[in-house]
Image: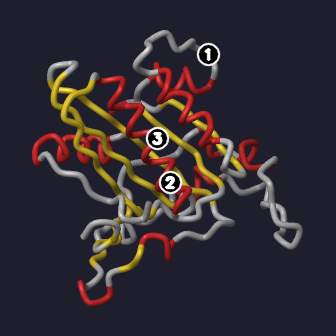
Amino acid sequence: EVGRVSEVRYFKENISSPLLTNESHADMPRDPGTPAPDKQTNKSEEVGRVSEESTRTNTVSSDSECDAAALIDPNRTYVMRFDGGSRGNPGIAGCGMVLYDADTGMEVWTGRQYLETATNNEAEYKGLLLGLQCARSMGVENIVVQGDSQLIVYQIEGKYKVKSKNLIPLFRAVMDLKRQFSFFEIGHIYRDKNGRADELANEAMDHKTSMGFEIL
């Protein structure tokens, strides 16, 4: 059902990343009443220690479907992975987004968007933008973004310039949106670590459907 999580999944892929080290979280804005993070605890290691038992799929009955926003704790950190693709470049395109709890690896929200015609890079940017919009709408304050498009990631980091006229409006929208988070980081991951977002992007293209945006 659009905008709802009918299945609580635990991410089997390893989401450990240099972005989830103590250094990344040391300067994260915190409520004065919130204790400082334990400097001996590495969040990447915590995620990697999710047991085999906890990684199995846990299904929530249709009678008790959870509103994704209800799973969000503004004091926690979330990992948003995105992907996009185009069959033709430009051609039929789609993007996929998935939001994880950084501590537990639990998948708390997914979305996919069908794009009638777009390039690969446009689809990637749409996935990034939509993922951030949905995360912010759900109340996420602290976010680590990961994608397998080095071009997009490096442009957001300021390492690459945005030269394509089609990408400039999308780039500006992402840059404006990232400022709305209390903590924001973005980093590149390899494609084999981005399987879930890729799956969602392909579903959007295969079925020519979109889902997950009722929360906006």
In the picture shown, does residue 190 fall above or below 208?
above
Amino acid at dot 2? Gly
Q: Mark 3 Cα within 10 Å, few/some/many (few <14, many 20+)?
A: many
Which residue appears farthest toward the left when viewing the image?
A: 207
Q: Given contact means CB atoms under 8 Å apart, are the residues at marks 1 and 2 in contact?
A: no
CA gap between label 3 and label 1 equals: 19 Å
Circle 1 SS class: loop
Residue at 44 percent across and 48 percent down: it is 131
Residue denoted by label 1: 159
Which of disc 2 and disc 3 is earlier in sequence? 2
Using the image, tell me which numbered label, if any, was put on residue 48: 2
Q: Given contact means CB atoms under 8 Å apart, are the residues at marks 3 and 2 in contact?
A: no
> Which label lies toward us, 1 or 2?
1
Residue 38 lies, in percent from the top left, at 79, 60
Residue 154 lies, in percent from the top left, at 55, 21
Residue 125 lies, in percent from the top left, at 42, 32
Residue at 58 percent across and 64 percent down: it is 139
Which of disc 2 and disc 1 is earlier in sequence? 2
Which of disc 1 and disc 3 is earlier in sequence? 3
Q: Quadrant of residue 167?
A: top left
Amino acid at dot 3? Leu
Residue at 82 percent across and 70 percent down: it is 34
> Which label lies toward us, 3 or 1?
3
CA gap between label 1 and label 2 equals: 30 Å
Residue denoted by label 3: 129
Does 36 sit left or right of 97 as displayed? right
CA gap between label 3 and label 2 equals: 28 Å
Which residue appears farthest toward the bottom when viewing the image?
A: 63
